[in-house]
Image (cartoon, rainbow, N blue to C red):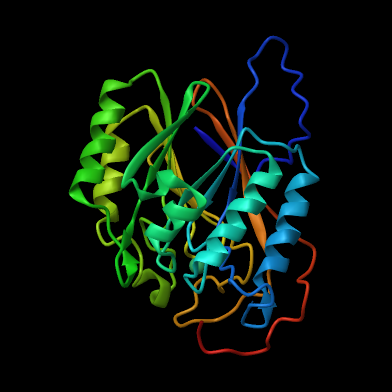
Amino acid sequence: MTEIGTQTPDGSHSAGTAPRPVRIFQFSDLHLYADPDGRLLGQNTRQTFESVVRLAQSHAWPPDALVLTGDLIHDQQAEGYHYLRCRLEQLGVPFFCLPGNHDRVDLLAGYTDSGAISGFRVEPIGIWDLALLDSTIPFNEGGHLETMVLADLDQYALVHPRRNLLIFLHHHPEPVGSRWIDSMQVDNGSDLMSLVAAHPNIFGVVCGHVHQAHEAHLGERNWMSTPSTCIQFLPYSESFALDQLTPGYRWFELYPDGRIKTAVRRTHTYPDPLLPSVGGY
Ligand SMILES: [Fe+2]
């Protein structure tokens, strides 16, 4: 089961002899630039990212791993990927990166995380497996899961019934109720959700892309999205619109029995004022 919106973990676990949960922090949609002064809709995305990192470091730091779910570098320059690699290494926490529609997979794999070139990969932490799926389509903003990716996931879940799986990908697998961004979801997301429903050892699906926190049930399982570390999209808007909510990240506590505790944590303010009205990004 998934318990969404639970209280902030303080890093201490007093549950007698209960094993310590695996703790994961997710950063998404950084939209960094090669230029340290690069801005997206008025926000210096390196500064907003750093504000989220500082927030994360002030709550139960360090986690067991960081997962970065795509749109990491907005201008697709090698310098941005190199910068991100150096910054993540400074944090001293294992990190795993997925590409988003704004990324160049070759540069992401070449400069930041070599594993990002895989369509499907598994990163084990304790009894949990983080299953990372590449949902990008070259030169396309929308998402798709290749037949082989879904087959690999299906096979892995089948032959590892005693492992707890949590799936990460960039694009959202189901609509969030915003027509413009829902036109860019995983176009075969129902195939993924059917697969999840068929495997009792898959306990959740986590994405980025929508720049907002969204949680939905899938039978006994949940899927959820995570805010961007920079700008936020207004939920349930027919066309592009910015939300006033601040940047953030999502934390997870993953328990041996499959329970997932998770919530979003946001910064108090933006480093710079939000632009009052913009038509897109
Ligand atoms: Fe994004």
Q: Is residue 211 visible from the viewing direction of this image? A: no
Quick check: 141 above or below 113?
below
Instruction: State which quadrant residue 83 falls in.
Output: bottom right
Q: Where residue 37 appears, x then y in whole percent? A: 69, 77
Left or right relative to 127: residue 227: right
Left or right relative to 18: residue 79: left
Q: Nearer the viewer, residue 140 or 244?
A: 140
Give the residue displayed 36% in from the left and 49% down from the top.
Answer: 117
Q: Is residue 219 visible from the viewing direction of this image? A: yes
Q: Where residue 7 appears, x then y in whole percent? A: 72, 40
Give the residue displayed 63% in from the left and 68% down from the top.
Answer: 230
Instruction: State which quadrant residue 203 falls in.
Output: top left
Give the residue displayed 56% in from the left and 68% down from the top.
Answer: 31
Residue farthest top in this picture? 17
Q: Where residue 247 appears, x then y in whole percent? A: 67, 64
Left or right relative to 277: residue 180: left
Left or right relative to 157: residue 84: right
Quick check: 241 above or below 257?
below
Q: Nearer the viewer, residue 41 or 111?
A: 111
